[in-house]
Image (tube, rainbow, N blue to C red):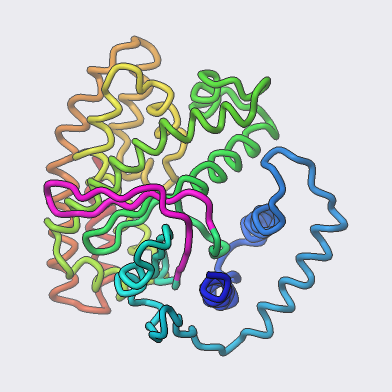
Amino acid sequence: MQALIDAVQHNCDIADARHGADYGVCTYLLKMRELYRWQRGIPLGARLEKEHVGEWLTAREAHLESLGGSEFAALDIGGRSIDPFEAESVNASLGAEGLVYSAGLVDGARSHFFLAELEYEQRADNGFLLRVSGRELARCLNSPPAMTRGSTIFLRRESLRRLLWEKYEAWLWNRPENAMARAIAYYPFDTALDAALDAMSEAEMAVIEAHERGEHQAGRELGDGWEAMLLDLSLTPAELMARAVRDHLADCSHTLPMLMEEGREPSLHLFMGNLGAMRKQLFPALQRAYGDWLASGDKSVFARPIRDGADHWLRLAQRMLALHGRNGDQAAKSIAAEVEASFL
């Protein structure tokens, strides 16, 4: 399998060479630092030697620069040469190797690949296939903990654990009294980092699965036209808005109803703490409900924004699709204006 691992990592490196400059300098350096930690197998929380990281970063950037203009390589498995974007063919060819592979486009139409050890897979009643991975063998600079590809949902336990570590480490800089602090307080981060990360990761696996179930449902409701629209909106404010709208739709239909269950309070705090600026701007009613919950301790304050949001975000997404249908790759401005007039 080492030849396959090397081939997938080669394609990951090409993707990083093409898209690494898309990040701001601080984000890029933080991602590179954590990639160094992953490549060297350094435990989370262990001190990194600045000199060693700097030397690795210089060599890494030289390697990525050497890949400029390179095309993604086919994967050779069992005597077959498979296009790297034919993820289902790759997974079928892996057979009983106990591995899982994914390929596709993520935010901004960036190419993305990963190869990991498969923990388990499960077929759901509504047709989608859930694949949960553990230790990662090849990955890109960006490693989202969950992705939906067609009718398959990929959950990446190691990527989620690393993401939670990064968020905890960022919080440590100033220790603000915010939603992240409230989530952290439920776990023994100060005394048992690994145990805390394991427990938080286990809880959040259920949350990201719920979100991806919502994404799968949204995909069925919105159809293939949504992905075509995102490609035409790529790298515009309208793309960010479209992704936020669909995220809200998925969360109002699946994630937030689950977070209303007893015992999900740490995850609810973490969910609210991780909402990006765009999502907060589009859904002020959710922010108000969170404030009301903190004041009263009564989760029923979320009932109305969740109920109204499920309908609101679906209708808005459908209007965005209609605008794209009329205006094609010139639809970005009209879609942005429609979203700006449709805050909830």
Q: Quadrant of residue 79?
A: bottom left
Dominant SS type (magenta):
strand
Number of marks in the rendered image: 0
Q: Is residue 145 above or below residue 236?
A: above
The one of 294 and 147 positioned closer to us in this rendering: 147
| Residue occupying the point 28% across, 51% down | 130
Horizontal relation, residue 123 to residue 184: left or right: left
Q: Is residue 105 visible?
A: no
Query: x and y percent of residue 306 in the render?
Result: 21, 32
Horizontal relation, residue 317 to residue 180: left or right: left
| Residue occupying the point 72% across, 73% down | 61
Q: Is residue 252 above or below residue 8?
A: above
Q: Is residue 48 visible?
A: yes
> Does the segment drawn in magenta span residue 124?
yes
| Residue occupying the point 23% across, 46% down | 214
Query: x and y percent of residue 273 in the render?
Result: 46, 33
Query: x and y percent of residue 139 in the render?
Result: 54, 63
| Residue occupying the point 28% across, 53% down | 340
Q: Is residue 320 above or below residue 78?
A: above
In magenta, the rendered stretch is 112-136
